[in-house]
Image (cartoon, rainbow, N blue to C red):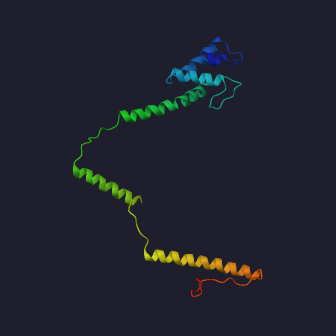
Amino acid sequence: MALLGGFPTFGADREDAKLTVSLIVRALDDVPVWAVQRAAGLFLKNLQKTRWNPERAPTAPQIRTEAKLIMLDVEVELHRLDQVLNAEIVDSETTEDERKAAVAHWNQLTTELGLSNVITERTDDEIAHERAEQLRANDAVERRGAWERERAGLPPRRTLIHDREPAE
């Protein structure tokens, strides 16, 4: 009533006001009073999250939506508490074989996920491929430098490595 009283009624008589309040109460019958009161306060201060035309009193669905948004954090916390309270109780006594099986399963999972703590060394082929790529990149830089020196009219740079052929 306090929320609706803050807006012009545009000629609504006492019976229309009672009917409007009755419809709003019916729409909010499953919403806690504290959430409805907080929603009403937000509408009066124009701080609500629900879209609404402030020239008119909020409708029952708009008040309900705002109250449900206010309740969302509480409902999330209630859900979490419900999960804890309804959790399945597991016997924590395990045999040595069960413990070993669990550890083996964990090791298998971490290996499959690539999270194992095993240090692997690169193969000779991987090292050779990396070296070839480095040589190719160095040759490309040297060719570019030689071309730039030639364009600038400078003599070729002397290199320490004369016996290897540039990679293609």
Give the percent coordinates (x, y) of residue 10.
Answer: 71, 18
Please indicate, yes or no, whether residue 112 appears anywhere in the rendered image: yes
Which residue extends farthest bottom?
163
Looking at the image, residue 142 sits to the left or right of residue 84; the answer is right
Q: Is residue 58 visible?
A: no
Residue 46 picture quarter: top right
Q: Measured from the top left, where is residue 157 in percent x and y?
A: 68, 82
Residue under the point 57% across and 23% down: 38
Q: Tell me if 78 is positioned left or right of 60 in this view.
A: left
Residue at (62, 25) in percent of width and height: 42
Judge by depth and name the residue closer to the eye, 8 or 142.
Answer: 142
Residue 16, percent from left and from top: 64, 15
Label total for image = 0
Which residue is at a point 65% across and 22% down the rendered structure image? Answer: 44
Q: From the image, which quarter does the C terminus lie in?
A: bottom right
Q: Is residue 10 above or below residue 98?
A: above
Residue 48 in the image: state x and y as whole percent. 63, 29
Q: Depth check: give the residue in front, 30 or 33.
A: 33
Quarter of the image for residue 4 reads top right
Quadrant where the N terminus is found in the figure: top right
Q: Where is 167 relative to 101, above or below?
A: below
Relative to 147, say whether 93 is above or below: above
